Image: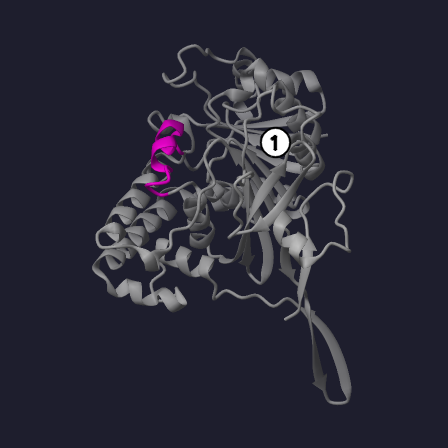
Amino acid sequence: MKKMFFLCLTFSLLLACDSKTTEKDNAKEGLIHKNDSVISKLQKDTNVILEVTNSFNTDNQFNNITSVLAGNNGKANSLNYLFDTVVWKAHSVYIDSSWNRLERKRLKAMKDWGRKEFETQNAEVKIVFYPFSGPDYLTANAFFPNADKYIMLGLEPVGKLPDLTKFKKGEPSEYSNDFKKSLGDIFDKSYFITRKMQSDFQAQKVNGLLPILTFFIKRTGNEILDIKYLVRYNQDSISEVAYDFKSDERKPFGVRVDFLQEGKQKSVYYFKYDVSNKLFNDTTVFYKYLNANTNNCITYIKSASYLLHAGFMANMRNLILKNSNSIIQDDTGIPFKYFEEDKKFEVKLYGQYTRPVEDFPYLSLQKHLQQAFHKDSLNVKKLPFHLGYHWGSKKDVIIFARKK
């Protein structure tokens, strides 16, 4: 399999790779490599057919580690022996049981409903943008399984996968317990609680959201192919670097996970970045990156702490309204009044609308959204699942806004 070096993730207007750079310089700058396509010759009768196929290696450290974390007994290749231990065997039983319950209670209904309600979007749009997501690839995939690229962001650290072969006595049990604890809220309530993530994803525990992110990718039936980190060079460029990249000057602020879904390679990007106006505007490289890579996307927003209601998030709110082909969100996303003022969207409502939960006492009902529900009450369909902050009252809402 041929190797091609000098691959940078960047904007064409900001970064060009110098083909004359030496391998030593490339290593210093953290440039990475990617597999080429392999041309294989198939001969049938007297006809020679040239077929281009991708060579995918699923027996790799990332896929094997994640298989253990995901409880996929017998599918971890060189790490399968770990399932013979008491800790990882019990871990597998717990994960399987919890996942099956999640499928029955929520995921299957979400998948069936999403494929029907978002049929056109799933067929046409290949990029899903999920701001304030944390590691929640799970629900984005449930609604939008056909996307080629998922771009996610939050304030949680990226972290690393555990090296399961180097755990000392007692550490497998501790890690398994911390890992299962970090999944508790998504299993029970459908969202991650920010203050708990800040504790659960500490380096001495699960170590960032990467283990949970890859767990969701794996448990939804995919194979992890590769993981690369993303490094920001001031306000000049964003580059991919190898997973084992080390630098005293620069720390990764993002990660790219490539995975295999039904024979097709896809990618999830997660960025740790504060997107309030001061740090996220048209002079910053991350704004330029998102502006270039979310054009004509589906934007999905859930359990977003009502951040887009605040003035200090205006730049992100405006970017979403400008670039999105469709916006699917609950009431914690963009205030409903902006859809009415914009005049570029047609909106469909689902579920029941009620005031924000008591964790946000400073917020009241959105009058524009309340009026829209009342006006269109005969056409508002109920949701066959529960999703978001109102897990207690089961009064959930989904706003489906489509560009005209």
Residue 230 in the figure: left or right of residue 395: right
Residue type pointed to by label 1: Ile
Residue at 30% in and 67% down: 81
The residue labelled by disc 1 is: 327
Residue at 38% in and 38% down: 201
Q: Position of residue 120 (x, y in %)?
A: 65, 43
How many residues crowd mark 1 within 10 Å: few (<14), some (14–19), many (20+)? many
Where disc 1 sits, the SS reads strand
Q: How is the image coloured?
A: one colour
Q: Quadrant of residue 338?
A: top right
In this orientation, does residue 5 appear? Answer: yes
In the picture as drawn, the residue positioned furthest to the bottom comes out as 45
Q: Is residue 162 above or below residue 296?
A: below
Q: Is residue 38 above or below residue 257?
A: below
Residue at 48% in and 31% down: 155
Residue 121 in the figure: left or right of residue 82: right
Along the line of sight, which residue is nearer the eye, 231 or 140?
A: 231
Along the line of sight, which residue is nearer the eye, 303 or 132?
A: 132
